[in-house]
Amino acid sequence: MTYKAAKLKFRLEALGMLPFVLLGKIAGHFFSLSTKHSVFLFFPNGDIGGSPQVNIDLTQCIKDKKPLIIFSKKPLNNQFRDKYEIEGVRVWDIHRYIDNKAFHFVNFFFRGLLATWINRQPKAVVFGGECIFFYKMIPHLNAHVRRVELCHLDVWFPYSIGLIDHIDLRIFSTEKLKEKAESLYRENNLPASYFDKLFFTDNAIDIPPYTLPANDIMQVYFIGRGSPQKRVHLVAAIAKKIHEKKLPVHFNFVGDVDKVLQPEAYPFCTFYGNISDQQRMLNIYANTDILLMTSAFEGLPIVVMQTMAHGRIVVSTAVNGIPDYVKHNENGLLIYAQSEADIINEAVAHIELLLNDPALRLRLGQRSREIALQKFSREVFCRTYRGLLKIDAI
């Protein structure tokens, strides 16, 4: 959708919802929020995942400002929910009210209600972390409210292009994603002032102590959700092919992959399910030789960052932001094939190459760790986000 078409669409929608939004604004003047906040964080829910972990990291960085987190989408597993229980931070989950298409007018009402409460704050900051309700809210906010968006994937672009007038800063977690936004702006002949609102910064992780890999049998891990973009069936096909070759390689799956695979059909693999315990995950990364990803699209997953920080090797399809961090034959191996059959064959070849060349494994892993130390510092992450949000002036 073009910028002009999207803006027209949102104007027409605004007319339809106007009575309910006004009702919410009136309610906002009669009923006050029970706690006082200047920073409002719009997140989808407490589900497990890479982008939610970034939201949690951000919250930790600014907890001294006592932000209000607003959850707006029904959770699928809620396995990260306890991580948002941070001293000084309030969480308000309103998904049961607004995430219901049959009563969508309630969603409109809450837009007006929240807008009134936020607009009352003289130095309010609103942040959206991969949250559709953030986009729904921002047209109702006054000009003095600072509105900041974080993007991990370009799937939001066709929708958000019509709302960029309401966003003061768009943060991208990969350089390639920022470049795609710039390309979209050029296609729509937008002025230079819009480009000035685009910013890239890396996510952050704790860098663990380095240990040498010590597995007798090479351990390959898939770590992630069982969503269509991950194409877990390709990882399973690669595991089956390696097994048929009788190679000393063991495949492991971490995540809710039982939605797309039948674990009993792969008795030669280990299935862990979802893991929310941080120490257990760190142990898994330390035990990993190869992280294997066959995604159709990606931002920069936390699992890639963690694998690099542990000095282990990423083998991944060369999609979106992955090649910005995983350089082929420098600190990992990329899969350039397009068809599923070719992806399987290329991945198998990469794994065999690494199996037969321990020196290559060591070199690639150590280079990954060097890059992680340079890019993923938590101190830099917090300092950067506090500056971008301008919360130290609050």
Image: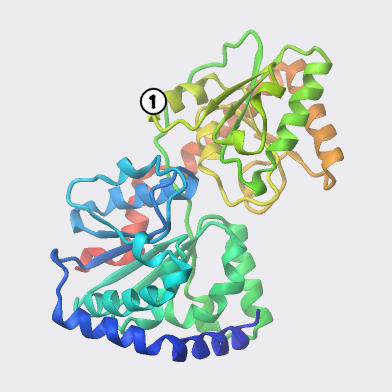
Relative to 216, residue 45 above or below: below
Asked where in the image residue 139 lies, by quadrant, the reply is: bottom left
Asked where in the image residue 25 lies, by quadrant, the reply is: bottom left
Relative to 4, residue 59 above or below: above
According to the image, label 1 marks what residue? 279
- Of helix, strand and loop, which one carries label 1? helix
**Residue 218 on image: x %, y %:** 66, 16
Relative to 150, residue 343 above or below: above
Asked where in the image residue 104 lies, by quadrant, the reply is: bottom left
- Which amino acid is tagged 1? Gln
At 30% from the left edge and 87% from the top edge, which residue is drawn?
A: 22
How many marks the image carries: the answer is 1
129 or 75: nearer the eye? 75
**Residue 254 on image: x %, y %:** 55, 30
Q: Is residue 371 visible?
A: no
**Residue 156 on image: x %, y %:** 57, 66
- On the rendered structure, is 42 left or right of 317? left
At 38% from the left edge and 78% from the top edge, which residue is drawn?
A: 108
At 30% from the left edge and 41% from the top edge, which residue is drawn?
A: 82
- Name the residue at the top extreme: 216
**Residue 330 on image: x %, y %:** 68, 35
- On the rendered structure, is 46 left or right of 317? left
At 19% from the left edge and 53% from the top edge, which residue is drawn?
A: 64
Q: Is residue 190 visible?
A: yes
